[in-house]
Every structure is written in structure tokens, then in C-alpha cells.
Amino acid sequence: MKKIILYSLVSLVFLATNSQGQNIPDMLENAIGAVVTVGVHKTDVVKRQLGFRGESAPDMAYEEALNLAEVASSGSGFIIEKNGNLYVITNAHVVENASADPGSIYVYTVNRSQYEVKVVGGDSFYDIAVLEFVDKPGGEISTIKFRSTEARIGEKVYAIGNPLGEYPYTVTDGIISAKNRVRGGMTGKFGFLQTTATLIWGNSGGPLVDEHGKVVGVNSQIAFADTPDGGQILQSQINFALEAELSERLIDDILAYDGRVRRAYLGIELSQKYEYSYDGYDYSLISEDELPVISGIIPGSPAYASLADKLGYQVKEINGTEVRNVEEALGELEKVKPGSAVKMTLDYYGAESVVSINTTELKTTELENIAKYILNQNTDIEMDYNHPQVAFNMKKSNYYYHEKETNEIKKFEMSRGGPGAQFYILAAGIKTDDGESMWLVEDLKDMGAALRLTGFSGVIDFYTYQAGGTMDDIELLRQYLSGDENITKSTIWY
């Protein structure tokens, strides 16, 4: 009798293990049908601020190679259903450089069918974008859902995407190794899951799914480490995906509010200054400010009445949470809903005070006011707000520009334009030796949005050209937020 019971238990264990082994391929088969390759066919030089199948998905996915010969750049994405409509979710950086012309973006599904899509909206800060179909999608696709519960440390997950743009429907597995990671850089900073499911270029925008095929995150970033010779090496076991709950909240906002994420508006400038120090061997940044400092208030904003006399005060807490730098301050402000109150604990040479500010919503007028506030601080130029484009006149005989041959920022000396010459701003952001993040500027609203994305760097770069000139005459103007190129003033406007 004991032997029979023992054999039965062994059989049950075998069946359970075998069943689980079969379920994962079944789950991935359905998930693969919801994954697409996002191909950008036409690009601009700068970024824009964003069921049943008769044949199994894996059979279709791997029959032939995907031909992306005409694609300028590509990434991954996945299809969801919202309010009875199908949408493609991807990273903002996959489509930010896409032209606004029809026929610029296509997705390629599991049987290599090509469908035109267009950008509904997105959020460059969180690096997420929503696309909608221009062409009616075929029956080969399936949809996938976001998970409603929080991911757990150690949980098994699978990343699906098109690494390097050459290997569509590649699946890698791993575990959730950490949660709520904060990433460096200007965009995509908060709310990331860390996972060991390997990502590579081209995986961007694809889904990270659990063992039930639910999306736990949107694959977004990979980690690098510096090498002794100054290069970088990929850290294949450290990968990041924007977690599901935050992703779905952003998507719902984008669909409900005309392509944008709703944000609160205070009208406050917070900053921290860092000074370059040279020890004889290398340069380093030494913090001048221990905490975020109120360095400006935008006139007429919700914060003006409460904080106009608080310039120079340090911010210790926001809504009861301690903040140590501008990034942590931004993280707390991102949690605030438009129309709600923000409570700030301030410190001025040891004396604490608490202020409460009722927020409004960040819209076009607010972004324009942010742009004017920042641009008016540049003493080298005089803005012309009556011009339909973002235009300015030179006040001095020199300005900073980018020399294309040496890829260096240098000071321009009077040979082009000079005092009184009018220029137009085409794009704003930052350009470095390692690359650029420049956003298209068509009006002051665009300018305000670009400046908010760039302020962490402490500098703002502008692509400009002189009135009467051509696009071949584009030069780069640099504005140091601190007013001193030796001091970095990491800044946010909220």
C-alpha cells in the first residue's frame, strides 16, 4: 500500500512539472502574437516631444527573416486593447526621431505583415509612447494585458523583442532582481523594475511578461559599466523595464488627455549647484548645495504668493518625504495630481518653515511661461516674442557654438551676425561628445517642454539659424543655467 501511494505521489509531481513546462511555451506563443517590430522609415534630424489564429504564432514568426532594409531605425512594441481599440506600446526613444509625414512609422507583426501606424502621444520623461493603427491590422495578431498586481522580487519573467533589429521574437528569461529603480540621465528616471532577462538594442519597447503572459513592465534600458580605458561594457544581467502600474497610468492619461500625461504645476525652480574641481589628474564635481534650493519662482504662478520671498531656501521635505537632491524632489512632485496641494518643509540657515501650495495643471500657457522665464535669463540674447517662430536678437558679439569638425563647444567671435542679428531656434536639448538629445521647437510650448527635459544637465543647447540664412547655416548656442561654465546648476521647473 505504501509503495502504491509513493508511486502516486511521484506521478503527481511529474505531471505537475511537465504541465508547468508546457504552459510556459503556450503562454509565450500567445504573447509573441502581440509583439511587433516598430520600424521608422522617415526620420527628422531632431526628436519630437512622445486571439485565435489558424497557425501558431511561433510557426509564423520564424518561417522567414524579417526584411527591414528600408527602415532607418527600429525597436520593439506590443499590442494592447483599450476602449475597444488596438494600440501599440513602445518606448518614446524608438519613435521620437520619426518624421511627422504619413508613412513614417510601420509595425511588423508575427507573420511579417506591415501596417502603418501613427503616434497618438507619449511621454519622453518616462520614455513611453502610444501608437495607433492607420492600416487595419489582420487576424494574425493577439493582444496582451498589463498585470494589475505588483511584481515580486525573485519572480520569473520573460523579455520579448527584436534585439539588434535582426532577431525578431527573441525570448530571454530571468527574474525580477529589484524594484523602483531610479535611472540616470534626463529621461526615463523613475519606477523601473530591474531584471536579469537580457535586453539589447532593439528590445526597447517590448514587453516583460510573467509566467501567465501578463505585462509586468515595458523594456526600456540596459546598464553599462565604465572600463579602465574610458570605454563602456554591457552589463547583461542588469536590465530595466518601466513597471506595469505606472505604464498603464501613463497610457490611460495619454489616451484621455489628447496625447499627453497630466502633470501638476507650481511655477517653481529648484536647483543644486556643483563646481568643477581639478586635483591635478582629473576633474570632479563638488556639490555647493547640500539640498535642493528654491532658485526661482515664475511670476503669476501658484507658487508665487507663497514662495516669492523664499528664494535661497532649501527644500527638506515634499509632502512629508525627505528629499536630498533635485532628482528626489522631482520624484515626489511627479506623484502630485493637478489641483491638489503640495506641502513643502523649507530650511533657511537652520530655521524651518512649512508652506502649502495649491497646484494647477501644466498646459500650454504654463509651458510658455517656463520658456520665457528661462530664456529671459540669457544675457547674450533678446527674445522676440512677437515672431511666430521662437526668435531672438543677438545682444553681444559672441556666443557659444558647436564646431562640427572637432565636435567641440567653442565661443563664436562676431564673424556671423553680431549685435542685432536675428536668429530662429529650431531645436533645444543637449549635445555632448557622446551624442545628443535635441527636441524639435516649433513654438514656445515646445521650448518649455524641451527645457524641462534638459534642466538636469545644467546647460541648454539650441540649434539656431540666422534670418535670411539656410538650413546649412545651423549653429549651436549654449546657455549655462548657472551663468558660469565652470559651475553646473542641475535644475528642474515644476
Image: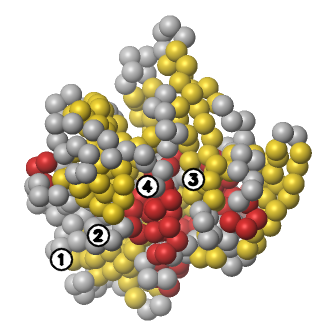
Q: Quadrant of residue 5?
A: bottom right
Residues at marks 2 and 1, CA–CA distance in whole angstroms: 29 Å
Residue bearing mark 4: 375
**Marks 4,1: beta carbons within 8 A:** no
Residue bearing mark 1: 102
In the image, is residue 443 above or below residue 480? below
Image quarter in which the N terminus is found? bottom right
* Residue farthest along the top direction in this orientation: 280
Q: Secondary structure at mark 1?
A: loop
- Point 54% across, 68% down: residue: 247
Residue bearing mark 2: 387
Residue bearing mark 3: 492
Image quarter in which the C terminus is found? bottom right
Q: Quadrant of residue 333?
A: bottom right
Q: In front here: 8 or 295?
A: 295
Residues at marks 1 and 3, CA–CA distance in whole angstroms: 35 Å
Residue 394 is situated, as x and y percent measured from the top left of the image, at 29, 49
For marks 4 and 2, the one nearer the N-term is 4
Residue type for callout 3: Ile
For marks 4 and 1, the one nearer the N-term is 1
Q: In front here: 371 or 97?
A: 371
Residue type for callout 1: Pro
Q: Secondary structure at mark 3?
A: strand
Q: Secondary structure at mark 4?
A: helix
